[in-house]
Amino acid sequence: MTSADLNAQDVQAIRKDLARFSRLQVPPVLSEAESAKVRQALDQLNQASDYQTLGICADTLAAAKAAMESYLRALGVEVTLSLPEKSEAVYLKFNTLKGLWYLDDYGGSSRGVLITYHASELDEVNGTYGPLPLTLFTES
C-alpha cells in the first residue's frame, strides 16, 4: 500500500497498532521487525500529513539531538540543530511547519519521542503517537 492509497480505515488500523505505546512512560525495546513495522506506519502517516511536531524527553541533550535529527531526516526534513548546552535531562520540541525548536530542562520520568501529525485532508491522521524509541531511525 502506498501513502496515496491510505484511507480512513487504513489510518485507524495504524492508530490501533501505535496505541500500544500511549500508556507507557518509556518506550519498549523493539525487535528489528517491530521497528521496521513502526517506521513504515510512521512513514505512511507522514505522507498523509501536512506537518508534524515532535517532542523528545531524554537523559542527555546529545541523545535528544541525535533522536530529533534522525526522526526529522525520516520525515524528509534536513536540519542540524544548534542548541545551547544542557547538563541534565531535557525536553526538546520541533515544529516542521515553522522550523522552530524549543529546549528546556526536564525533571520527569518519561523518555522517548512523541510525534504529532497534523493533516487537513484526512482528519483521522491527526494525533499524537508514542513514546517511541529514541533510536528508532538510527537503528536502520
Image: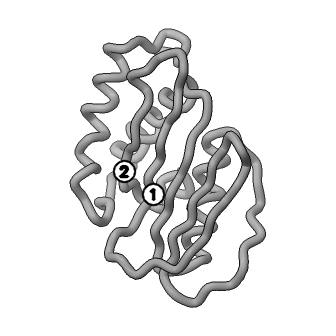
Q: Which mark is residue 130?
A: 2
9 lies left or right of 97: left
For residue 94, what is the image quadrant? bottom right
Q: Alpha carbon of mark 2 to alpha carbon of mark 1: how far?
A: 6 Å
Q: Residues within 10 Å of mark 1 (few under 14, many from 20)?
A: many
Q: Earlier in the sequence, mark 2 or mark 1?
A: 1
Q: Position of residue 133 (x, y in %)?
A: 41, 58
Residue on which disc 1 sits: 113
In the picture provided, is 20 more to the left or to the right than 8?
Answer: left
Q: How far across and how far down the image is residue 118, in percent?
A: 52, 32
Q: Residue at x 31, y 40 (%)?
A: 18
Q: Would you place residue 41 above or below residue 87 in this image? A: above
Q: Position of residue 24 (x, y in %)?
A: 25, 59
Q: Check disc 2 and report its element: helix, strand or loop.
A: strand
| Residue type of the residue flagged with mark 2 | Gly
Q: Is residue 10 left or right of residue 113?
A: left
Answer above or below: position of 81 versus 2: below
How many other residues sit within 10 Å of disc 2, few (<14), some (14-19) or many (≥20)?
many
Residue at figure coordinates x 55%, y 73% from the top left: 63
Side of 32 relative to 49 (left or right): left
Pointers 2 and 1 in contact (CB under 8 A)? yes
Which one is nearer the viewer's eye here, 38 or 8?
A: 8
Identity, as a three-letter code, of the amino acid under mark 1: Val
- Residue 102 picture location, percent across and down: 63, 64
